[in-house]
Amino acid sequence: MLLMKNQKTADVVIIGAGIIGAATGYYLAKRGCKVIVMEKRFPCFGSTGRCIGGIRAQFSHDLTIRIMLKSIAMFQTLDRELREDIEWYAGGYLFLAFDEQRKKSFLQAIAIQRKYGLNVTFVSPDECCRIVPGLNPEGLIGGAWCPTDGQANPFKVTYGYLNGIKRFGGKLLVNTEAVKINTERDRVVSVVTDNGEEISTPTVLNAAGPWVKEVGALVGVEIPVYPDRHEALVTEAVERCLEPMLVDYRPDGCYFVQHYGTGHFIGCYTPVPIVPGDRVDASDEFITEMPRRMVRLLPKLGEVKVLRHWAGSYEMSPDGNPICGKTPVDGFYVAGGMSGHGFMFGPAIGELMAELIITGKSSIDISEFSLERDWTKAEAMK
Ligand SMILES: Cc1cc2nc3c(=O)[nH]c(=O)nc-3n(C[C@H](O)[C@H](O)[C@H](O)COP(=O)(O)OP(=O)(O)OC[C@H]3O[C@@H](n4cnc5c(N)ncnc54)[C@H](O)[C@@H]3O)c2cc1C
């Protein structure tokens, strides 16, 4: 391929400056790769800037648990690595069970989680009320409790990684959309942007979040990721009174946490039925329902005022697990379909994808999350 004078080149072009693109770019740049991150709007424009910052290892899939144990270990020291206060705080996650079926599914997941050394137990309603003073125990039969889960600030983590990329000599292009990916003999050779620039590269990572399907289509690779709308709210700051993320999986349940530093409550729920598509309008239904659901769980929140309400996308794969790895087009990689957990996966997936891209192998084998897989092993703790 002939290069034009002044044409940009990169070892790896990353499409998307959310947590996944930023983290992968950082670990690639740290290992000496020349990285260009391309973002159609601005960093955190996609799901990352709309998420509530929860981080947990309580999953049902073996590989997800292993990835999250790695990610949590990384979050614990990320301040130093990124030279940024990322607001990591291990306040735990308490998943509430209101029926025997849910208790059974938590117990099954706990058995798998404990195999990997996670400090997680099924606790009584009294113990739930000890962990969360003021919790309404009506109908509660217990909870899955892990004190090492936590929270961090998605903006600070993502910008920390992006600033790190620049320190290692990489580039971030904002307001720059990838509109075409050129291939020669089924191998990536360049990316064309919406301002007509062509960047030569042998490697492209599709980290486009809710839009990974559209970016995959640029090279004819079908990536089964479908966004659906999730809304969230934040309240005024009040005195600290809740340590863990509280998760209520009932169809009319919700999940929320109190920011350990500021005292704001931040939370969301999964609507029934889901609202498909990448729309991010905010609904009357949510702003009426969500406070009611929060107060049902924690009546003392009755006087707390809501400050803001917004929406973003969960980027769902068919089994609720990430899609990470190579694709049928040489040099074209994907890290998407995070199914509502991409922030917490960020550090580990970023490092594992960087290893895979550079050496062809990652230190945790993530092939179970490859594009060509059996989609029947669904995540039970979505
Ligand atoms: C309300 C809500 C609450 C959530 N809570 C949590 C939580 O507590 N914990 C957790 O771990 N996760 C949570 N999530 C999920 C999490 O936000 C996502 O899984 C994660 O942010 C996905 O990151 P990403 O980098 O893959 O995608 P994104 O952050 O969406 O980044 C993709 C980027 O790609 C860019 N892009 C797309 N197409 C192109 C193109 N052609 N050219 C250039 N750029 C392009 C987009 O503009 C976007 O900025 C939540 C999500 C929502 C909506």
Image (cartoon, rainbow, N blue to C red):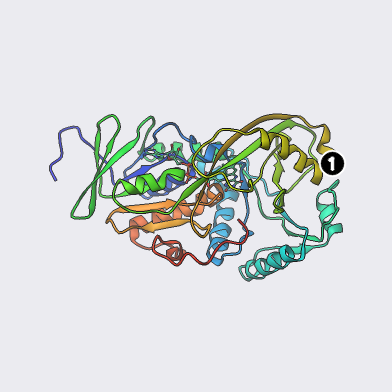
What percent of the width, then of the height, locates residue 44?
A: 49, 36
In this rendering, is residue 254 above or below 195?
below
**Kind of element beneath mark 1:** helix
- 83 vs 353, left or right, is right
Query: Which of these two is toward me, 371 or 197?
Result: 371
Residue in the image at 76% along x and 66% along y: 100
Q: Which amino acid, by three-letter code, is at mark 1?
A: Pro
Query: Which of these two is toward me, 311 or 68?
Result: 311
Residue 68 falls in image quadrant: bottom right
Residue 103 appears anywhere in the view: yes
- Label 1: few (<14), some (14–19) or many (≥20) C-alpha neighbours in 10 Å: some
Residue 168 falls in image quadrant: top left
How many marks do you count on the picture? 1
Query: Which of these two is toward me, 137 or 121?
Result: 137
Residue in the image at 82% along x and 57% along y: 140
- 192 vs 225, left or right, is left
Residue on which disc 1 sits:
299
What percent of the width, then of the height, locates residue 38?
A: 36, 37
- 370 vs 89, left or right, is left
What percent of the width, then of the height, locates residue 67?
A: 53, 59
